[in-house]
């Protein structure tokens, strides 16, 4: 059992040494600081089970320190130590900002009982979540054995993620969850393999009763109706953002905005040249290649060059919808300088009817993790990857931009073009020298791979995909597999194992949030 860690902040901390020694004799690891600034820094650097906070400290007082602590670690219990039982402290307690408060002078036994109660509450909460999950385990397993529609898959994915976020400290339950998660993704791959071609047929027939909203329908379904409300719309596409990463962002944005959450499914392949172009053009890749043959052909040797035309795609989409008079602004933010310049001029964007903003940092983070041993050490698994993303966002220009937008009369819509999956298993693929290079999908001639690891697309047009003289079929990886050629197999297996990849058919890559936010002010 790990030793519970306590942080105690008080400007008269030296007078509290007997209390600290008493807690240490009871088995607690106590760190003491004498001001609010040091308390905030300690919480950012370390994990604490309870924070004891003096309300009346010089400089940054207790309530200011509380706000900063909750911004970086909203889950840590905080006990406010005060000289009087004031009404605002009761309000803070009821609002959940503080877990309890004590009135000075405090005695060691009183502090010990409060800490025990809070720690037991956390332990009981963990046990309750574990019990809930284990009771739900069989029901989820039974659901996975029966046919599910696209909405039910969204529900399954959300429920598994909810347990993934809540199950802390119970490694046995976590292992069971991870195994069930893998089984869910295995079943999801079969679901996509069985249903996707029918979805495209329904698109071609103008039907939408029994399929999800797909990438090319995001702007018509979610963005254009918001424009009708006659307030500026800021539309963010955060490249490669998984739903679990959004849930970390959501915690910080919830105090600023009222939110409506819906979902769309990424088209296949779940890769930027396909899904993001589909979002901005309102077209499937097959139809993009027909309408803009030169643009698509020019990107044949460099797939990422196909994403240089998102702004004209968006302009054409609006014209075809008879919205050519809409004032549009488009920005693609790649580096930190782009982002900071955007955040500094955020109020300029509410002067347009529609601002479309592509944010590339999360995609850069996913790719950088594959190339950096330091990032792999910092984010060895999904939980740590989420935490790393949250840390970036909390201190980013993007969060500052959202805080500034929360002061404006506007509508903010956030989505992503695709997610990413932690690729842990390699599968062999055979193709000629003209075969594409991506790890989670391939297109070329006479491609071969394990049937159970990939979706084979023999008729690209039936999947809404373009075909040319170099392409006769596509293969899409399922679950967490990535494609490796037999030549130098072991070298590339080890090179790409445990990297964040996209392009395939998994819940993380395909089931994507669309968030409509309106400022609470």
Image: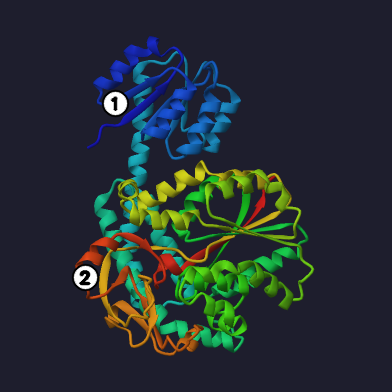
| Neighbourhood count class around disc 1 (C-alpha, 10 Å): few under 14, some 14–19, many 20 upward | some
**Residue found at the very far top of the displayed protein:** 15
Residue under pointer 1: 29
Q: Position of residue 324 (x, y in %)?
A: 77, 71
Dot 1: element = strand
Location of residue 514 with respect to 341 vertically, above or below: below
Judge whether residue 423 can be spotted in this image.
Answer: yes
Location of residue 99 with respect to 230 vertically, above or below: above
Residue under pointer 2: 488
Q: Position of residue 253 (x, y in %)?
A: 57, 47
Q: Position of residue 227 (x, y in %)?
A: 73, 64
Task: Find residue 368 and name its label.
Answer: none
Judge whether residue 156 can be spotted in this image.
Answer: no
Task: Measure the alpha-carbon separation of dots 2 and 1.
Answer: 51 Å
Question: Of residues 426 and 158, which is closer to you in this image?
Answer: 426
| Neighbourhood count class around disc 2 (C-alpha, 10 Å): few under 14, some 14–19, many 20 upward | few
Quadrant where the image shows the C terminus: top right
Residue drawn at x 34%, y 15% is: 19
Quadrant of res 43: top left
Question: Of residues 330 and 176, which is closer to you in this image?
Answer: 330
Q: How is the image coloured?
A: rainbow
Question: Of residues 52 and 480, which is closer to you in this image?
Answer: 480
Quadrant where the image shows the N terminus: top left
Name which of mark 2 and mark 1 comes first in the sequence.
1
Q: Are marks 2 and 1 in contact (CB under 8 Å)?
A: no
Count of numbered marks: 2
Dot 2: element = loop
Residue drawn at x 55%, y 86% is: 202
- Disc number lying in front (2 or 1): 2
Q: Position of residue 206 (x, y in %)?
A: 61, 86
């Amino acid at each position: 059992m790990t030793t519970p860690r306590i942080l105690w902040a008080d400007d008269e901390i030296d007078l509290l040494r007997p209390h600290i020694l008493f807690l240490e004799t009871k088995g607690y690891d106590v760190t003491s600081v004498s001001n609010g600034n040091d308390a905030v820094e300690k919480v950012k650097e370390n994990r604490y089970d309870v924070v004891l906070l003096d309300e009346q400290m010089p400089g940054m007082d207790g309530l200011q320190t509380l706000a900063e602590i909750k911004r970086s670690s909203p889950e840590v219990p905080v006990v406010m130590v005060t000289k009087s039982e004031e009404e605002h402290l009761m309000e803070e307690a009821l609002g959940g900002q503080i877990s309890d408060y004590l009135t000075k002078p405090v005695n060691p036994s009183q502090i010990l009982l409060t800490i025990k109660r809070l720690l037991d509450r956390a332990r009981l909460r963990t046990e309750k979540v574990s019990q809930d999950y284990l009771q739900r385990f069989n029901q989820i397993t039974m659901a996975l054995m029966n046919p599910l529609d696209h909405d039910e898959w969204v529900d399954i994915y959300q429920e598994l993620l909810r347990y993934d976020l809540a199950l802390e400290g119970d490694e046995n339950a976590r292992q069971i969850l991870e195994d069930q998660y893998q089984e869910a993704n295995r079943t999801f791959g079969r679901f996509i393999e069985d249903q996707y071609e029918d979805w495209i047929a329904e698109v071609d027939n103008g039907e939408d009763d029994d399929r999800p909203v797909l990438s090319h329908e995001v702007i018509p379904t979610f963005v254009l109706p918001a424009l009708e409300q006659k307030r500026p719309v800021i539309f963010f596409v955060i490249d490669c953002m998984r739903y679990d990463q959004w849930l970390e962002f959501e915690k910080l944005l919830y105090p600023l905005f009222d939110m409506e959450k819906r979902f769309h499914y990424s088209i296949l392949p779940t890769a930027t040249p396909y899904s993001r172009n589909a979002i901005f053009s309102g077209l499937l890749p097959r139809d993009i290649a027909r309408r803009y043959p030169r643009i698509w052909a020019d990107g044949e040797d460099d797939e990422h060059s196909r994403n240089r035309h998102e702004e004209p795609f968006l302009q054409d989409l609006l014209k075809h919808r008879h919205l050519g008079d809409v004032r549009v602004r488009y920005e693609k933010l790649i580096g930190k300088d782009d982002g900071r310049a955007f955040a500094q001029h955020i109020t300029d964007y509410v002067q347009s009817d529609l601002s479309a903003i592509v944010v590339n940092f999360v995609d850069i983070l996913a790719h950088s993790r594959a190339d950096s041993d330091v990032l792999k050490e910092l984010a060895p698994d999904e939980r740590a990857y989420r935490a790393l993303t949250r840390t970036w966002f909390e201190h980013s220009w993007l969060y500052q931009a959202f805080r500034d937008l929360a002061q404006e009369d506007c509508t903010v819509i956030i989505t992503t073009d695709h997610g990413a999956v932690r690729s842990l298993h390699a599968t062999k693929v055979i193709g000629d020298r003209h075969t594409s290079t991506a790890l989670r999908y391939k297109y070329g001639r006479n491609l071969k791979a394990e049937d159970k690891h990939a979706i084979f697309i023999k008729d690209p047009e039936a999947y809404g995909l373009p075909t040319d003289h170099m392409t006769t079929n596509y293969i899409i990886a399922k679950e967490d597999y990535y494609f490796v050629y037999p030549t130098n197999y072991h070298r590339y297996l080890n090179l790409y194992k445990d990297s964040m990849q996209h392009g395939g058919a998994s819940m993380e890559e395909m089931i994507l949030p669309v968030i409509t936010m309106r400022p609470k002010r």
